Image (tube, rainbow, N blue to C red):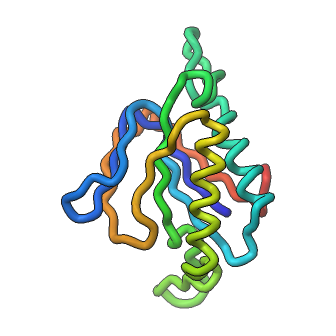
């Protein structure tokens, strides 16, 4: 699994004109799922996400997690995180999991994040064409990949 995490002041996701999820201060998480991903990837990633110390403490040092600041999380599926542009100029998405594999893993990831966070996680709609509005805070943007746990 691969995620792009953005610390936000607020974020919302729309399908057409309908808002499907929104959060105040917290994290916007764009998630890509690979065919070989499984439960161990979900558990590691969800735990890591809620405990990442990327929010400021009173001294202005990034020393607090989304749990510590009682922040929210908005998760949006994004298969393009597995784009390969190795050959030519048109990206290939062959490494991205097909929907029959990705949807159950995505749903399990959202459930695990909710458990770790202790409250519901907001989402977009898997596979839909979505518009995201956000106010990035910092900006603070990180990439995590379960195949490269740096």
* Residue 3 found in image quarter: bottom right
Instruction: Mark yes or no: residue 85 visible.
Output: no
Q: Residue at x 53, y 25 (%)?
A: 70
How many dots with numbers? 0
- Outermost residue toward the top in this view: 58
- Work out whether residue 11 or residue 101 is closer to the camera in this orientation and state it: 101
Q: Is residue 120 left or right of residue 132?
A: right
Look at the picture and state if 64 lies above or below 128: above
Look at the picture and state if 79 lies above or below 57: below
Look at the picture and state if 57 lies above or below 113: above
Rendering coords of residue 51 (x, y %): 69, 34
Image quarter (top left, top right, bottom left or bottom right) of the N terminus: bottom right
Instruction: Mark yes or no: residue 80 visible.
Output: yes
* Residue 86 found in image quarter: bottom right
Q: Which residue is drawn at 60% across and 51% down?
A: 111
Q: In this view, does 76 lie to the left or right of 109?
A: left
Rendering coords of residue 56 (x, y %): 56, 21
Rendering coords of residue 45 (x, y %): 70, 50
Q: Residue at x 51, y 83 (%)?
A: 91
- Work out whether residue 8 or residue 113 is closer to the camera in this orientation and state it: 113
- Outermost residue toward the left in this view: 17
Rendering coords of residue 14 (x, y %): 29, 57
Q: Residue at x 48, y 35 (%)?
A: 72
């Amino acid at each position: 699994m691969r995620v792009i995490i953005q610390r936000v002041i607020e974020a919302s996701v729309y399908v057409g004109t309908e808002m499907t999820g929104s959060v105040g201060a917290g994290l916007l998480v764009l998630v890509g799922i690979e065919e070989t991903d499984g439960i161990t990837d979900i558990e590691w990633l969800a735990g890591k996400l809620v405990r990442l110390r990327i929010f400021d403490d009173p001294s202005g040092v990034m020393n607090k997690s989304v749990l510590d600041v009682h922040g929210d999380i908005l998760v949006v599926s994004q298969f393009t995180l597995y784009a390969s542009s190795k050959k030519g100029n048109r990206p290939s998405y062959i490494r991205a999991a097909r929907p029959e594999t990705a949807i159950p893993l995505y749903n399990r990831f959202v459930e695990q994040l909710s458990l770790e966070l202790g409250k519901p996680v907001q989402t977009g709609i898997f596979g839909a064409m979505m518009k995201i509005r956000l106010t990035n805070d910092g900006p603070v943007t990180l990439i995590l990949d379960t195949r490269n746990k740096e």
